[in-house]
Image: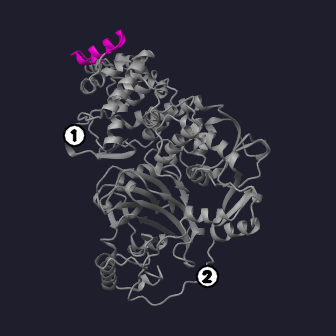
Amino acid sequence: MKQLYKNYLFQKHILVSETKNPENTFETLFSLANLFAIRITDGQNLADASMIRYASSQLGEKIPAPFYKGFPESVRALTVDELIYDQMLHYWTTYGLGDFSEVGHSVFEEQLERTAFKENVKIKDFRILPEKEALKLVGEMVTDLLAGSRPLNEQSYLLCLNYIRDFRQIPEKIASKNTAILLLLDLRDPEMTKFLKLSDVIKVVDELNHKDYKNDNIRKLNLKNQDRVFLTKIINRIISDGKCDLAACFEKKHLWNGFLHHIHFRAKSEEAEIFADAMRGRENRSVYSTFELKMEAGDVRGAAQYLKNEKGSGAVLRNLNYLISRCENEDDVTFVTECLDTRNVIILIQLLIQYENYRTDGSARTFTFTKFNKLKAHTETGAEIAKRRSVIRKEQAAYLADLIRNRLKELLRGRVGTVYIDPAMASYALPVQENTSQGGFGVLPKGTRLPIGEAKILRAFTYWEKVNDIDLSVIGIDGDGRQMEFSWRTMARRQSKAITYSGDETSGYNGGSEYFDINLELFRQKYPDIRYLIFCDNVFSGIPFSACFCKAGYMLRDKIGSGEIYEPKTVESAFVINCESRFAYLFGVDLASSEFIWLNVGRSSTANVAGETRLDFLLDYFHTTDVINMKTFFEMCAEKVTDRLEEADVIVTNHSVDAPEGAEVIREYNFEKVISLMR
């Protein structure tokens, strides 16, 4: 089986058997349990020795150790001067002498033998599937992913692309325009245009310009002739299929005009000629132009109705703040909200989160959006705050949140039958915007909150190859949004038993690594004003993550610190960072609740150090599950909720259960199924 499929299934706690007559089955099962805390719950007879090496590669057993041999105990005994001298000596050896032959250690550190591993660890339940059955499951996952209306992250997209290529199947349905556009460009199959309208071609050009030409300015095109021919063919096909949405094309009229000139477009039908003349003419008949005219005239009701008729209720939802802020009375508000009969579950969920967390304190807001699977952020300036126009009152936000929640309940009711929901699922967020995230073992949707436990130390790690230096940083944020940086440039004076930093190890042919240990109990005592921690990765060497190899993740370790520095049994997550950026947010910690919060965001940034950027806007993710989560979502979807496993058609849990025959078990990492339910 293709490695990509196996890796994706491993993240769903599935190993694939490719051996007809597996040998050493018992020894394999014992080794998986002993080395990685993996328990096989189904398919034990299919276990074979290759799975040991494979699990090791996925959990990252063979990675570079930091040059502090006894990390973290012995590091804490070193003085600031010793730490600085150690780093300078190590860098001089590595970069000055070019010595990558072996891992170095501190010249001041005592020889220290680590105790045998004896920490308490969480068991990871896996099952083994034969290859044919595993491939069928991959196909089901691809179908579910393509049913989602949101863009996919890089790993999920590559899974879909490879499956379509390997089995030469054009999907029945692709709900996301972004996904359809990427597949059209990668497959170069005109059949993919059945998922697009003519107005989507500008998005095709923008993506092609970025993907193949590394140019993000669509106004400065320099396409090759073969691409001009391809795009012309797409336009003609879409027009001949009767999908010329002329009003929507007017919204990008200036871009269309330049693009048609660049490809030397010549109309070959009456419809194409009407379209081309409209884009080259002076008149602009876009829906939003008329909408704005109505808004400027104070006709809020007419504007909302017009937008609904021409663009659908989703467009009204996206302009809801603007519309509500211009309403003169409650009757106007009621009229606007009656235009919200959308069936787009994901838009409703995103707006529910927005209005439940709506702030009216007048502080600077940070607006985020994604493009090319990278997050962009803009924080309001003082001048922009003074010119705010689309502001609604707190009670209006609460009213809209209630309205949207009730609409969601109506839409979702009965999508599944009788459901048993583990109470712990209230900690897991829904996968509503995962396109900026990285894929890997243990990765969960943004905003998911997991208990750390008082007796544990959080060990965050990153390691890399094919690049000189990647920096792991921790940013502390207090209740007023002030930041404190813990990184390579500050840790020499902040090293303590509360927070310990390994320094980076860059010698040895395997690559480099860095670690942070956070003892939450001691950290809270030493830094009582800090409420949140956010972990970040930066490529200091000046290239994007996609041009090197970088893995990151975290372990939960006992305070006794037994075992090796990198102990696979304690790995909760290990994922590859491969975004086209030099900056990634990894995860956070809520110190008040002692919870780990998933972030996993690739940001469009060239910052060398995380401490030079604002991160407080990420705290919105920390409250996502307070608004809606896996538990409340399935309560909305259920015909009936039961507390008896034997009655359930669907079981939603993060634990191993003895499911009744025929019942479907949905785990915290099966977000393909959740995506399909949100369509």
Q: What residue appears at the point 24 percent right and 33 percent down from the top-left corner? A: 219
Q: Is residue 281 magenta?
A: yes
Q: Is residue 633 above or below residue 343?
A: below
- The quarter of the image holding the C terminus is top right
Which SS class for mark 2?
loop
Q: Is residue 193 magenta?
A: no
Q: Residue 309 appears at what percent x and percent y? A: 42, 16
For this rendering, which residue is in front, 427 or 599? 599
Is residue 331 visible in the rendered image? The answer is: no
Disc on the earlier residue, 2 or 1: 2
**How packed is label 1: few (under 14 Cα within 10 Å), some, or many (20 or more)?**
few
Is residue 443 visible in the rendered image? The answer is: yes
Residue range corresponding to the magenta coloring: 267-285
Q: Which mark is residue 116?
A: 2
Q: Residue 575 appears at what percent x and percent y? A: 50, 58
As shown in the figure, which amino acid type bears the numbered disc 2? Ala
The residue where tag 1 is placed is: 386
Which SS class for mark 1?
helix
As shown in the figure, which amino acid type bears the numbered disc 1? Ala
Q: Are marks 2 and 1 in contact (CB under 8 Å)?
A: no
Q: Is residue 632 above or below residue 38?
A: above
Q: Is residue 60 above or below residue 252?
A: below
C-alpha distance separating marks 2 and 1: 62 Å
Q: Residue furthest front?
A: 226
For this rendering, which residue is in front, 245 or 488? 245
